[in-house]
Image: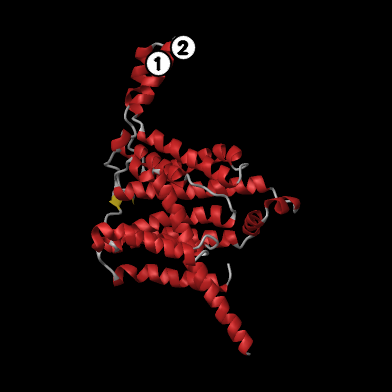
Amino acid sequence: MGRGNLITLIIFGVIIAIFPLVLPSPYYLRVINFAGIFSLVCIGLSLLVGYTGQISIGQAGFFAIGAYSSGILTAQFGYSPWIGILVGIALNALVAFIVGIPTLKLRGHYLAMATLGIGEVIHIVALADTEDFTDLLRWIGIKIGYAPAALAKALAPYRSMTGGPSGFGQIPALGVGSWELGSPVQWFYFIWFTVFLLMILSLNLIHSRVGRALRAIHGNEEAAKAMGLNTARLKLGIFVTSAGMASLAGSFYAHYVTFISPVTFSINESILFLVMVAVGGMMNVWGALVGTIIMTILPESLRFLHDYDILVYGLILLIIMMFMPNGIVGLFQSLFSFQKTEKAGEK
């Protein structure tokens, strides 16, 4: 992964270790914990959009599948949260695999629109009350001659599983046996240790043969094909991987907040994830991390402006987008390269 990334990882690990000691406030820890959960989505999105060049505006949909799978299995069926997380990842991988095969043949705006549609379909399913689906299935049962009473009895336990627009709560926290993650500090170390591990895996992936192939696809897909790369398989693989990361984040969110509703998984959230990656710098996985932290903390920092906070928030975003096309991390990389060139010139 290179000496620079290794040093940055060590610094990142030290910051994680001492952060709760330096800033023990439960409020700030809670905010930074949300930043950690969203980082899991944005790291996957950075691999897909920044390194492979495949636009996705439906990441909140995969985030929702993870949250609802884990939430329903634990709160309504009594399964272990760890089983819920694994089922969520498996379900997300299956959905991403099925929709990715036809969708990833599209390019540019068409691909963006297709992924937007996927996210919206998942959001509508979460928004709709399951009772509507059971009624629909009963109607289908009548049409095909199946006894409606028996079908209604079979479907009775599954009514209102998602809670419809109101969502549902009482989702248990993560834990082992009778011990559960309770305090913000415990959650902080759990969430950010997971982020740390995923950063190591992502950096190794980027600097591996597969990572170089992904960057080749981003640069020129036709040329990558001509070099003998199986671009369809690589794009599908990274699409499934990013969906799995979003699922993991969704499960963490469900067990951390202990309540979920469709509002959290709308298209606004998908766009926010993209903005987080763009603000930090799309072509750098560290950028996804930095962008997510800034975009999570910034709205909280501007609350003292009351009704004007949205104006300042928009202005800051506009300045970053206009004057930092490669994001904040990209700007620092350019400055560092410039200084290095200047020093080399002086010698």
Image location of residue 54, percent across then percent down: 57, 50
Name the image colouring.
Answer: secondary structure
- The CA span between labels 1 and 2 is 9 Å
- Residue that extends furthest to the bottom in the rendered view of this protein: 347
Quarter holding residue 15: bottom left
For label 2, count other residues whose C-alpha is less than 10 Å away and answer few (under 14), some (14-19) or many (20+). few
187 to 120, vertically: above or below: below
Residue of label 1: 139
- Pick whichever, 342 or 85, lies toward us: 342
Kind of residue at disc 1: Trp
Residue 291 visible in the snapshot: yes
- In this rendering, position of residue 161 left or right of residue 6: left
- Please give the label number shown on residue 36: none
Residue at the image point whose x is 41% and y is 72% from the top: 14
Image location of residue 147, percent across then percent down: 39, 11
- Pick whichever, 63 or 72, lies toward us: 63
Q: Secondary structure at mark 2?
A: loop
Image location of residue 234, percent across then percent down: 63, 49
- Pick whichever, 24 or 39, lies toward us: 39
Residue at the image point whose x is 55% and y is 73% from the top: 334
Quarter holding residue 83: top left
Residue of label 2: 144
Quarter holding residue 26: bottom left
Image location of residue 154, percent across then percent down: 36, 20
Kind of residue at disc 2: Ile
Q: Secondary structure at mark 1?
A: helix
